Amino acid sequence: MAPRVVVIGPPGAGKTTVGTLVARRLDTTFRDTDADVERAAGKPITDIFVEDGEPAFRALERAAVATALAEHDGVLALGGGAVVAAENRALLAGHVVVFLDVGLADAVSRVGLNRDRPLLIESPRAQLKRLLDERRPVYLEVATVTVDTGGRDPEDIADEVVKHVH
């Protein structure tokens, strides 16, 4: 069993919104590894970061990604930083992986400099720019398809993603 499509991208790319729309269009289920991590930990991701630290979160995330890739056959969205782990990148080989590419201005407006995003707590705009710059090459490395989300609505983006799913 394998997901029909895996959606990756930074905070504000629209992974959950677009992934949910894609699942509806493909008449399948949607799963988000961030939600899996929160369920496993019994608390929000922000609390995991604050109380347990980023390494603890990343360990939970690696386990959630491995489990979801092995048992979910619908649309799967990975947390924004999941692709940083080499183990996760290796597990993505052979999957249809769609990178939702987003520019800083769109990401900032979508995230709204949200304080519930643990890596964006201090200087959110600067942190988001750093994340986009650091992670973009990794997203491109694992993606089989890149979809530019700039200035587009989620419905339009979902339509394009569906075209790449077999």
Image (tube, helix red, strand yellow):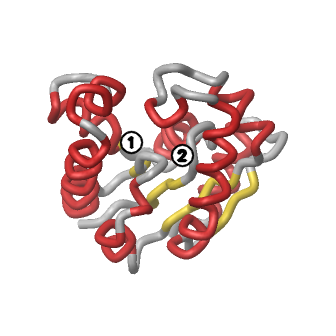
Give, as a three-letter code, the residue at label 2: Val
Q: Residues within 10 Å of mark 2 (few under 14, many from 20)?
A: many
Residue at the spot 50% in from the left edge and 54% down from the top edge: 7
Position of residue 106 measured from the top left corner of the image (x, y, whole percent):
77, 37
Give, as a three-letter code, the residue at label 1: Phe
Q: Tell me the SS state at disc 1.
A: strand
Q: In terms of depth relative to the viewer, which is nearer, 12 or 132?
A: 132
Position of residue 59 measured from the top left corner of the image (x, y, whole percent):
21, 52
Left or right, residue 127 beside residue 55: right
**Res. 117 mark:** none
Q: In terms of depth relative to the viewer, which is nearer, 156 or 70?
A: 70
Give the mark count: 2
Position of residue 134 measured from the top left corner of the image (x, y, whole percent):
60, 60
**Res. 22 mark:** 2
Residue at the spot 47% in from the left edge and 44% down from the top edge: 23
Residue at the spot 48% in from the left edge and 48% down from the top edge: 80
Position of residue 113 measured from the top left corner of the image (x, y, whole percent):
64, 24
Q: Is residue 155 above or below residue 130?
A: above
Left or right, residue 68 beside residue 3: left
Sequence order check, earlier mark of 2 and 1: 2
Q: Tell me the SS state at disc 2.
A: helix
Report the residue marked by disc 1.
30
